[in-house]
Image (tube, rainbow, N blue to C red):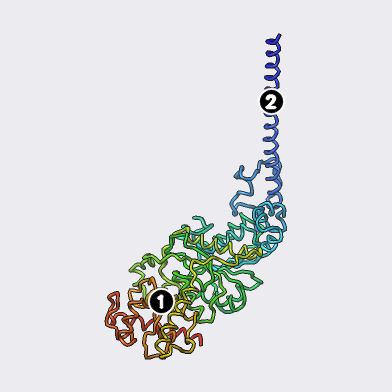
Amino acid sequence: MNRWATTETTKLALTALGASIVTYSVIEVYRTFDQRRRRKALGRDVARHVYADVGSKGLEERDISPGLDDESPLVQPLDQQANPAAVNASTYDESLIREQLSRNYSFFGDEGMSKLRGGRVAIVGCGGVGSWAATMLVRSGVSYVRLIDFDNVTLSSLNRHAVATLADVGTPKVTACKKYFHQIAPWVEVDARIELWKSGREGERLLGGNIDWVIDAIDNITTKVELLKYCHERNIKVFASMGAGTKCDPTRIQISDISDTQEDPLARSVRRRLKMSGITSGIPVVYSTEIPSDVKLLPLPEEEFKKGAVHELGPFDDFRVRILPVLGPLPSIFGLHAATYILCDLAQKPILNPLPVRNRKKLYEKLLRDLSSREAKESSESGLMEKLPIDEYDISFIFEDLNRGRSSIPPHPILPKAHLARWDKSKPLAVDNCVVLSAADVKLLDQHSGKGADVPTWTGGTTGMEASPVVERRLNEARQWAKALS
């Protein structure tokens, strides 16, 4: 009897298990079928809203599920679509836009995204840096971008440009960007200007129309400084990209105010020129603290020299003829930094305190304190003196801009402990009579009556005849800088 009961129990258990398996299988088949049906319906709905002019003939019968059918209007190249220009914010369903930007909405919230989507950004320079910045602005929901660049896509552009393909070679960079952006976010207004930005009435026209932010992605220093000066004087927010060429270390890339940059030759030159115009801070930049390597401008072929004056070979006045080697990923990182900073600002979640690699303020304070002590000892027997005629701002110029954070004496080594001193003790202390020296070189200077020109040989082996002309040139630069500020 017990054996019979056990057999029946086993049969019932197996029957129940079999029924469960069949039920589960039926449910999974239905779920798979239902997902496919809904995916098809969503694909038809997206296509109907986005490409209203494509035509609805046979649309219901076609499988246009996104990502599954290459014939879908959503994945066709722009030049094969019926009327991409007709697609804009009014024809694209808002629910689809919100779904596409759902991750951004989760991060910034409805209020922040509303402000971000209402943002208007101009990108000046649409090469390796500008194209990446513009791409992420568009992908992130900014509804208006103005692209300004006179240049065309070349084969050499393809190692770093965000969107250009072989088919775009020979076409304007802004055109390539606009075509690509319509495939990503057809509701975004892309204002492409095939023009060179220059200060004056034309520059004013190119940046007119209530622009919230300007991205400076220009690699020509003269135009870059003019653009930054133009925006700063008119209270137009501008974010500048410094030098991405000849760099390879992505861990050295950071955002800071222009006044806090270091080790970047382009940032140094821009900073110095802006200071001469009275602009010392207030411009956020992306730059690299990577020590400049021995990578140089690509050589100009001999046949180009035979054509005449080298400066006349460039496409425009002041534009360099030769180019810097560029490792493709680095410009993209610069552009992504710029886009991120601006997106956060537009959404009113700004990056308030970008972390600078250096903390130079304490260094400047120490240099100033040591210089003050040195001057006090030399000024009077009491050790008292009036306030120094230079301040921390001047110290930063002398140490960073004029001497690149190195010794004033060739070969300009980096000093573990730097000191400031007058180059000529017989003249008053001023920015054009102050040098950066090692402790050993300060002793040599003192041993020769405080006159640098009289030191026969410096500690590094550099003779006075070699060092003096170099120092004098830098002091003359300081003199011109001080004159421009006065």
Q: Could you tell me which secondary element the residue under label 2 belongs to? A: helix
Quadrant where the image shows the N terminus: top right
Q: Could you tell me which secondary element the residue under label 1 belongs to? A: loop
Q: Is residue 54 above or below residue 255?
A: above
Q: Quadrant of residue 67?
A: top right
Kind of residue at badge 2: Val
Residue 150 appears in the picture as rendered: no
Q: State left or right for residue 142 relative to residue 394.
A: right
Residue extending farthest to the top is 1
Mark 1 or mark 2, earlier in chain: 2
Q: State left or right for residue 336 relative to residue 87.
A: left
Residue extending farthest to the front is 382
Instruction: Name the residue that disc number 2 marks.
Output: 22
Q: State the image coordinates of residue 259 (x, y, percent, origin top left).
A: 51, 74
Kind of residue at badge 1: Asn
Residue 300 appears in the picture as rendered: yes
Q: State the image coordinates of residue 302 (x, y, percent, origin top left).
A: 33, 69
Marker disc for residue 191: none
Residue at the image position 65 percent from the left and 60 percent from the top: 188
Question: Residue 424 or 137: which is nearer the viewer?
Answer: 424
Q: State the image coordinates of residue 296 (x, y, percent, origin top left).
A: 38, 67
Marker disc for residue 403: 1
